[in-house]
Amino acid sequence: MNKAWRQSAVMAAVLAQFIADTSRQNVLENGDTATILANLKASLAVSSPPADSTINAKMTVATASASATFTAVEIAVKSALGGPTWLLSGFNKTIKLATTGADGLDTGTVPVNGYVALNAIFNPSGARALLAVNANAGVAPNVYGGAKMLAGCSASALLTVVPTNGSSQFRVCGVLGRRVPIPLGTFFTVAANIPGQNISIAAFAPANAKVIFGELSASCSAAANITLSVNSDNASALSQQNLSTFIGSVSAVFIGNFANVLLTTPQSIGIGANTTAGTPSFSYYIVGYEI
């Protein structure tokens, strides 16, 4: 009997210390089991990885297709933000945009020249699947927020948001963790100096995109100094990156790259460019984004 009491006392003390350390709340022996339980749940949430955490998540769409295979060493899914977490190892599922339900679209039709969010969904009994969601309307949540969760599935996580083409297929793209590389796409080109302004990039990056990567090019009809800039927003010039050079030949083309430009406004970016002489030609391109 003494051994049993000692073991239970030790385990109770260890559990109480865990709650206190992680929840930053005192654990009082006052009979208030509701508070202790609430603090325990908070402690478990704090010690769990966030929903949509992945290890070595990958997907490749080499040619336009209505299907693609998503793999990951591990994925964290939750019943809700702050809720219980399940870790799914060895995730390997193929999403089919032409179907509805498990490993297909949750409801409706695939957007044309838009975006779909891919979610991992999980039934605590062990079943797992992918669920695609039309992501044209706005930012897709970190856990599935639609009304078409499959029966028995109570946990989910946003994995990625990828583009679709005019035939409601996946466009050529890749997924590496939270990054989505895409083929070089021109989002702005002009044959004049550019006063600071904001440009929509909705055709190349979804509302979930937080960061973009790209390329700049410039040429001029006369020898001149040129400067190009890209930033989060023209008004604040946050995350601004500048490229400057001298173009000494009318046949010369200057090309440079930018990376990790933060998007403070979804699907919008600030740009600017000028030349000291001649008629310029400026182009801005996107090569990928991160959600």
Image (spheres, rainbow, N blue to C red):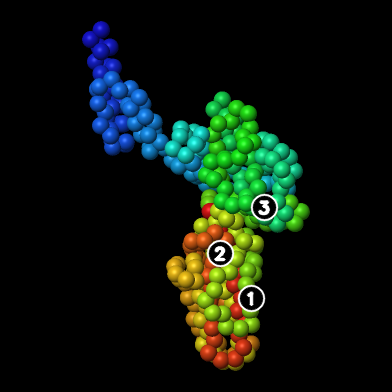
Which amino acid lies under the numbered mark 3 shown in the image of this protein?
Answer: Val
Per the image, the residue denoted by label 1 is 189
Task: Tell me which corner region of the image, top left, top right, bottom left or bottom right, holds residue 209.
Answer: bottom right
Q: Tell which tag, 2 or 1, sits nearer the viewer.
A: 2
Per the image, the residue denoted by label 2 is 268
On screen, residue 283 above or below 16: below
Q: Residue at x 40, y 36 (%)?
A: 45
**Left or right of 55: which side holds 280?**
right
Badge 2 or badge 1: first in the primary sequence: 1
**Left or right of 18: which side holds 219?**
right
Badge 3 or badge 2: first in the primary sequence: 3
Task: Tell me which corner region of the image, top left, top right, bottom left or bottom right, holds residue 46.
Answer: top left
Q: Distance from label 3 to label 1 (Cα)?
A: 28 Å
Which amino acid lies under the numbered mark 2 shown in the image of this protein?
Answer: Ser
Residue 91 appears in view = no
| Secondary structure of residue under mark 1 | strand
Q: Residue at x 71, y 43 (%)?
A: 108
Residue 116 appears in view = yes
| Secondary structure of residue under mark 2 | strand
| Secondary structure of residue under mark 3 | strand
**Left or right of 79: which side holds 11?**
left
Q: Position of residue 35 (x, y in %)?
A: 33, 27
Viewer-proximal residue among 197 and 71: 197
Q: Distance from label 2 to label 1 (Cα)?
A: 16 Å
Q: Position of residue 176 (x, y in %)?
A: 55, 52
On screen, residue 112 above or below 258: above
Which numbered dot is residue 61? 3
Q: Residue at x 58, y 36 (%)?
A: 121
Viewer-proximal residue among 214 and 42: 42
Q: Position of residue 269 (x, y in %)?
A: 54, 67
